[in-house]
Image (spheres, grey):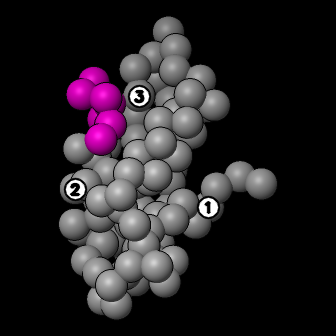
Amino acid sequence: MRTTTYHFLVAPDGRGPEGAAPELAAVRLISLLPADWGYAPEFPGGTVSLRLTPPAGTTEEAAHAVVAEGLADPSLRGWSWANRPA
């Protein structure tokens, strides 16, 4: 089975402290992911560009649900999924 990498853009949404470090947000979000997921963060312009590779067979809907659940964690207050599908 083929693995797929998904791209998530996480950005400050004004609810958190001004100047919050995107690197810290990435560490917090990554720590909430299942242990068998691969990740590659980048930090363009104060945001987090996160490429996630879940195990083969993980649906796009399941990947989205995991990220949405992680971003709902209180430790990520002030960060939102900026490229979330409508």
Towards the viewer: 74 or 44: 74
Towards the viewer: 41 or 31: 31
Instruction: Name the residue rendered at 33%, 84% in the picture.
Output: 17
Q: Residue 14: x percent and y percent?
A: 49, 83
Which dot marks residue 55? Answer: none
- Secondary structure beneath disc 3? loop
Instruction: Name the residue rendered at 44%, 53% in the picture.
Output: 71
- Residue occupied by mark 3: 54
Is most of the magenta stretch helix, strand or loop?
loop
Residue 3's place in the image compared with 48, above or below, is above
- Secondary structure beneath disc 2? helix
Query: At label 3, which amino acid type do we have?
Result: Pro
Magenta range: 32-38
Q: Residue 70: x percent and y percent?
A: 41, 46
Q: CA distance from mark 3 to mark 2?
A: 17 Å
Instruction: Name the residue rendered at 22%, 56% in the picture.
Output: 27
Q: Residue 39: x percent and y percent?
A: 31, 43
